[in-house]
Image (spheres, grey):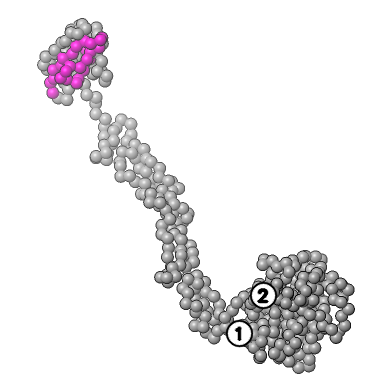
Amino acid sequence: MSWVAHKPVEVRMYSLMRGGLVEMERKVYRNRRYVSLIVGVFLVLVPALSWGTEPPLWEIYNTIYGETVVHSNQELWDTYAVDYDEMWRANNGYVVAMARFAGYKQKFGYYTDGCIGSERIELFQVTKSGYLNPEEYGSFLLAEGTIGFYTEPYTTASQGVWFSQPLLNADSKDHMWTFRAPEFDITNPEYVIAWEDLPNLGDADYNDLVLVIHFLNPMVVTCCEDDSDCDDGIFCNGVESCSAGICEPGSTPCGDDGFFCNGTEACDEEGKQCTQSGNPCAPDLMCDEAADLCVGCLEDNDCNDGLFCNGEEFCNEGVCIQGENPCPAGTQCNEAAQSCDPVPPPTTTTVFPLPPLSEGEVVIIPEAPEVVSGGTQQFYAVTVSHGRIVKSSYEWKIVSSAGIGSTINNEGIYTVGDQGN
């Protein structure tokens, strides 16, 4: 059954905390099934009950949910029973008393010191019999944490206290049964808890007090006296502790340390140690812890390639930016000296005037005192082939005949018809 919101009803609720009760106002939304229950319960599902006839628990369960869900206690147990219900994890849940078919009145509440049961907080006393008005006994806000439930049957004097933990009961019997709602939703949990209030389970009808609880879930607990009672010998689930008589689980010792660059944390149970996967970045990248990223650089020095003539590199948002030639115009870069040097004047060759040349004619230029090339004197043989001056067979220098003191053409071309002065 889902908890359907309808017309809000202002009720006084209590935040149940270890130190006592903190009164607060809160709106609670009534389920229309509970409202219709009071009006139609005896007309629809409960056949002509007299106050001397108690309905079985399965009938009460059907009445709570306004439909025939089960047909016997055995079917109710087989279909909806909760295997463990001794302790509960409370998260601001609430409880509603739905029925009491017992000779004793009932005090109902919860306790916060599991396995001990001495720190009890009473929620309400149910004095009326039969099916109850949920607005009269309901919607008490529960504390956060681990709790157990108890009921205390009484007339003028207490008849003892029965706990949700059988080990705390005088007869060591299980006096509380728990059943899931027919349409159970783990995100909006709802359970029916049913009590037997007689020693040694009496008639074992479990209809002495029946309640519905919301937003709480049962949990498995281990009782303890000190932390050593709780140690399960497993490293990776952390160190267990004993709190208020109940073993509390530890937390993993290998949680995320918040660092990106050491990789993912994991727990090695065999070695009983925490491990890390290491640097998550590829070999050619660097790890940026501040940005949780793998990048090409972190600072300018990461980009330095050691060369002078390609300029100074720098790092911009994890990316290396190449520099530029550091030398100004009119200079040339000297990598060996890591300096900017003046550009030397171009090498020139002074040539002798040449006579007119015909196709195929070869002219040997003798030693020429004014011919300069790298500080040595040279001989040249030139010939005309297909209208172009070509190199000699023993020299790779072609000169221009434009005149003495001219610069050699960079293509080494001499046009037929050109001649010296």
- Left or right of 362 in this view: 195: right
Residue located 44% across and 70% down the image: 269
Q: Within the image, what quadrant is residue 408 found in?
A: top left
Give yes or no for residue 400 being in the magenta stretch.
Answer: yes
Of residue 154 and residue 407, the one placed in the foreground of this image is: 154
Q: Is residue 41 above or below residue 308?
A: below
Residue under label 2: 82
* Picture coordinates of residue 198, whole percent (x, y): 73, 89
* Picture coordinates of residue 311, whole percent (x, y): 34, 40
Of residue 164 and residue 207, the one placed in the foreground of this image is: 207
- Left or right of 377 in this view: 36: right
Residue under label 1: 115
- Left or right of 147 in this view: 211: right
Residue located 57% across and 81% down the image: 222
Give yes or no for residue 381 being in the magenta stretch.
Answer: yes
Residue located 40% across and 51% down the image: 282
Give the magenta-colored segment's residue range. Answer: 376-401
- Could you classify mark 1 by the number of other residues whose Cα lies within 10 Å: few (under 14), some (14-19), or many (20 or more)? many
Q: Is residue 139 above or below residue 260?
A: below
